[in-house]
Image (tube, coloured by chain):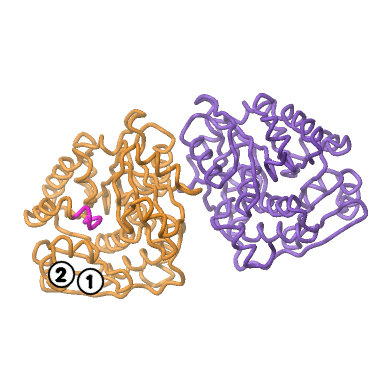
Chain colours: A orange, B purple
Amino acid sequence: MTQFDVLTIGNAIVDIITRCDDDFLVRNEIIKGAMNLIDAERAERLYALMGPAIETSGGSAGNTAAGVASLGGKAAYFGKVAEDQLGAIFAHDIRAQGVHYATPAMGQEPPTARSMIFVTPDGERSMNTYLGACVEFGPEDVEPEVVAGAKVTYFEGYLWDPPRAKEAMVECARIAHAHGREVSMTLSDSFCVHRYRAEFLDLMRSGTVDIVFANRQEVLALYETEDFEAALRQIAADCKLAAVTMSEDGATILRGDERVTVPADAIEELVDTTGAGDLFAAGFLYGYTQGLSLERCGQLGCFAAGLVIQQIGPRPTLSLADAAKEAGLI
Amino acid sequence: MTQFDVLTIGNAIVDIITRCDDDFLVRNEIIKGAMNLIDAERAERLYALMGPAIETSGGSAGNTAAGVASLGGKAAYFGKVAEDQLGAIFAHDIRAQGVHYATPAMGQEPPTARSMIFVTPDGERSMNTYLGACVEFGPEDVEPEVVAGAKVTYFEGYLWDPPRAKEAMVECARIAHAHGREVSMTLSDSFCVHRYRAEFLDLMRSGTVDIVFANRQEVLALYETEDFEAALRQIAADCKLAAVTMSEDGATILRGDERVTVPADAIEELVDTTGAGDLFAAGFLYGYTQGLSLERCGQLGCFAAGLVIQQIGPRPTLSLADAAKEAGLI
């Protein structure tokens, strides 16, 4: 029985977002455009240097689940927060979006994960993530009936950072495939690919993962090449379906010998790229689980990504379903 | 010795902001445009009904202090949070804005105050405030040297809601006047005026307060009249200086027989009125403490208010000083 279109699994994070200039990144040794992992001590030091901020629920896969639900899809999420105020905010926001979320919160220490996100004038976001309670996520948090009942189970490459989440992922993939479902992942970040290249390639080549999302930098990092076309050919060979985003150049979808390229949506003003990849995945997977064409899936991905980069924060503040209907996409 | 241009005092609140339609307000008996005081139980019930939200530091006087600092003024703030994550966010944001803030946080219960703010499609905000730790604010939180060193001490009428804050205000006014400083207040909200009309009038008529900020509804409520001109004449008689805002009609400043009216700034899109009055006070008091003309003070008030209503949240996300310089106002 299908209960969900998409189950997403990831680090449950509250974003703390501010603007800064490029000098701030340089002075504080923050790698621009990347997800920088930080410990509790650096989190405190960096927060003291950070300007006034706003808080919003985030986490890559959490944003994707919220996007699927906002488009009208049935979404579920696994991810770990602590029993604290930020954890309550995270749980509220994802449930209020209509996403099934029942992972138990775990004590007060370590606290709920937060990512300090610095948005430079060019709209690029640079993230500094303290994983906190996410390190407690493990196989015991898998809800087997949710995995069994989801058309696609999707997880973040970022989950290879905490110690035991990968065990949970392998178990989820096993359950999903046993029920004839598909498994998907995002490569998350080019530095994350550098950390776990061999494992990610093994997930793809072993058939543990069917559908892979990546951006240009991530796919180049995966195959350690500067030749994008060569990287595209390799990822098409390594998984059943790959969706590769290329910022303002749109996205290319590869399935065997089939290749579909869709243009990026025109945008009025690039405000904040936070959530762009997450919302591309949301739009694509919503379309995919509704049985739409690869082209339409790609269009929905570009559409959702195009909306979220014209606002502050990684989750759409308006109904994506209404917007996509108005645009004639669904 | 002058250490600060403006000291502001108020309920220290984290805002939880979402959009909703007018029906939601009706169904949940939220008075539109008002500050609705709620208890912990209703706060929980309402949060469960609330859509996905963003969090940002708020509190009327806190927003005003942030605005003064953003304009380049020296600002200080008194207000009470708890030792919890929302309290840490509040303290971080106001200090990161350059505001002196040293009120000690107080335990974990009651928690830091929050206001659930629902923004309707017309941009109007309707607030639902759980006062939490604010009820602990009292005379022991007054830093006498800060009051003595601030050109203007400004407080919210909202401070009459918690039990002991008013004692602190009377003490602050005494210290300020003993040092030749001025005392200012905002009437805050027309329902707040209804609750404390006699006390507010007494503060003005006794000379405890010199400068009063109000909007049209509040000044009408104060004098229980529908005749705006009559209300303006009365408030001019009851305090040394009054600044009355009139939404899209700008503001009128009254000092004795002197009257200056300034137009509202043209805006591109009304997004969220949260913080409009607070930022008017910030702009006005910044100008006033720099010795600018009443007209320029009013222009700065309208300018700062006009900027904040074109964004989500009550505190400016850009430098007001830069914006005001670009507009030729400072």
Q: Is A174 on the left-hand or right-hand side of A265?
A: left
- On the question of residue A126 being in view, the answer is yes
Q: Is residue A76 above or below residue A256?
A: above
Q: Is A322 on the left-hand or right-hand side of B236?
A: left
Q: Residue at x 59, y 31 (%)?
A: B103
Q: Is A222 on the left-hand or right-hand side of B226?
A: left
**Residue type (three-letter) at the residue carrying disc 2:** Leu
Of residue A130 and residue A101, the one placed in the foreground of this image is: A130
User: Which element carries disc 2, helix, strand or loop?
Assistant: helix
Write the start and end of the magenta stretch as one range.
A186-193
Cα distance in 3D space between marks 2 and 1: 9 Å
Q: Chain of mark 1?
A: A
Contact between labelled residues 1 and 2, with CB atoms less than 8 Å apart:
yes
Number of other residues with Cα within 10 Å of mark 2, as a class: few under 14, some 14 to 19, many 20 or more:
many
Chain-order first, disc 2 or disc 1: 2
User: Which element carries disc 1, helix, strand or loop?
Assistant: strand
Q: Is residue B43 above or below residue A198?
A: above
Q: Position of residue B253 (x, y in %)?
A: 82, 55
Q: Is residue B195 above or below residue A53?
A: above
- Seen as rendered, the residue at the extreme front is B1
Q: Residue at x 28, y 60 (%)?
A: A281
Q: Which residue is mark 1?
A: A252
Q: Tell me which corner region of the image, top left, top right, bottom left or bottom right, holds residue A216.
A: bottom left
Q: Quadrant of the N terminus of chain B?
A: top right
On whether residue B97 falls in the magenta region, the answer is no
Q: Is A59 on the left-hand or right-hand side of A2?
A: right
- Mark 2 vs mark 1, foreground winner is 2
Q: Which residue is mark 2?
A: A232
**Residue type (three-letter) at the residue carrying disc 1:** Thr
Q: Chain of mark 2?
A: A
Q: Quadrant of the C terminus of chain B?
A: bottom right
Q: Are marks 2 and 1 on the same chain?
A: yes
